[in-house]
Amino acid sequence: MNMNKILWVDDEIDLLKPHVMFLTSKGYEVDTCNNGYDAVEMAGETAYDLVILDEMMPGMTGLETLPLIKAAHPSLPVIMVTKSEEENIMDKAIGSKIADYIIKPVNPNQVLLSIKKNLHSKQLVTEQTTADYRAEFGRIASQQMAASTFSDWCALYRKIVGWEIELSASSDKSIREVLSYQKNEANQEFSKFVKRNYFNWINQRAAEDEIPVMSHTVMRRRIFPEVDSGERTTLLLIDNMRYDQWRTIEPMLRGYFDIATDDFYCAILPTATQYARNALFAGLMPLAIDRLMPDKWLNDNEDGGKNMYEEEFLQRLITQSGKRYKLSFDKLVRPEAGRRLLDNMQHVYDADFSVIIYNFLDILSHARTETDIIRELTDDEAAFRSLTRSWFEHSELYTLLRLLAERGHKVVITSDHGTVRVDNPVRVTGDKETSPNLRYKTGRNLAYNSREVYEVTRPEDVQLPSGRLTSSYIFAYNRDFLVYNNDANRHIRYYRNTFQHGGISMEEMIVPFAVLKPKKR
């Protein structure tokens, strides 16, 4: 292992020889000099890993030396040593992008700590995080075995996602693989849990406290009560947003909002926009929508837009619920729509209840499938989260949320379903009218291994329209994706490691639900 090279600059460097010897004993190679001129020259000739720089030196001060070193080596960490804690001096030093500062008299352990923070923080964080997760591994396994309600699975999923985010910065690939295995195992058990309980949930055959809030009940049970509180409320529905993506953007909002609620609800099957989002706004399961408003429901094999009536569905639900909200409704499919909304926000500000549907994450996940460069940029889950954060930070959506905070609007952020990265092909056969979705299929002549999918041979049993009298549904589990036997290898190569939705997994069904209250200014 290579020794880290440090340059220590101080006009009284001879008095610091014990400190230098201490660092040498800890495995560092330390060069010294007693003035800024030599420091600039030495930094130009030698590749140092870190510089310790005295702020007060005769001739060229530390504050004068600092920009000269930084000009040649912008990323070189510099620790400033100072006798003064005067605010203006510290402001200048911090403004010049010092890595840290130490107040004289210098303590050798303090110096060592600062060096470790700047040179070894990633390694130390990796080691500690790995140790913490290893200690937590058994508790997560026990929590999984004990999970018997949807709330239990939400708590487990929250914990797993938390560790995913913690370990994403780790250089220990093996521990990330252990977590991936544990998450996969949890998803397998979650799929069995859903299969055992879904029929009873949908048909209210379970105890009331065992039935989760679901797509078709979330508006009445969770969103309307927020509007009824009397505060102007904006519902922001970000299509295809998973919990880990919400966790990625949530810290950026804390300067503007307090997070009053950080919870989940359960998306219905199929976890696809056509079904889950229509159910959310109508307050009805898809079968009921089809029966009550047949002109506003299209089955998978029918041509036309399948999410054209969300506003009408919501207005009908508001009226039937006896509400008198002044409603505004915006659906942003393309970036220019977001820009137009920012230029015309008054109708949002004036509404008791404003709804904004934002489709970007859904577009992004599909683009990842279809575009090689985006697939390369989002090679894994951590990279996909990073791209989500980068998009959000520079998006009209972020600007929109800041404007809503300034106007004192309460904001409900949720999604219609999530998405899962698929890697295991499951072969099926069907006729030309079989739906093309990779996580669920519906059709008349489906052939498959019933042990590999969740099959629903009578769609009305789970409140889904059949389309044709003999149609059935099948849903993929965990990270499976459904491919036809003919030309299967080409489809497997194309779709493996893409993000898909429509099936049964924690990522798709456990949907984030957050209530944000603007900070008082």
Image: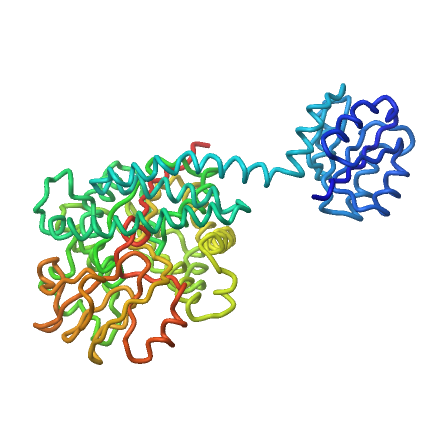
Residue 123 placement: quadrant:
top right
Looking at the rendered image, the quarter that the N terminus falls into is top right
Q: Left or right: 99 with respect to 65? A: left
Q: Where is residue 93 drawn, in percent x and y?
A: 73, 34
Query: Given the current orientation, which residue lies at the most extreme front position?
Result: 1
**Total marks in image:** 0
Q: Which colour scheme is used?
A: rainbow
Q: Where is residue 380 drawn, in percent x and y?
A: 46, 57
- Inspect this view and state whether residue 47 appears: yes
Q: Foreground: 38 or 7?
A: 7
Say which residue appears at 28% left-offset and 41% top-offset. Answer: 144
Q: Foreground: 486 or 383?
A: 486
Residue 7 placement: quadrant:
top right
Q: Left or right: 183 with respect to 61? A: left
Q: Where is residue 480 drawn, in percent x and y?
A: 31, 62
Residue 42 placement: quadrant:
top right
Q: Foreground: 184 or 119?
A: 184
Q: Left or right: 113 with respect to 258? A: right
Q: Foreground: 18 or 49?
A: 18
Q: Where is residue 40 drawn, in percent x and y?
A: 86, 42
Residue 274, above or below 509: below
- Inspect this view and state whether residue 311 appears: no
Query: Given the current orientation, which residue lies at the most extreme top position?
Result: 105
Residue 105, above or below 121: above
Say which residue appears at 83% left-offset and 38% top-offset. Answer: 65
Say which residue appears at 13% left-offset and 65% top-offset. Answer: 465
Q: Left or right: 377 with respect to 275? A: right
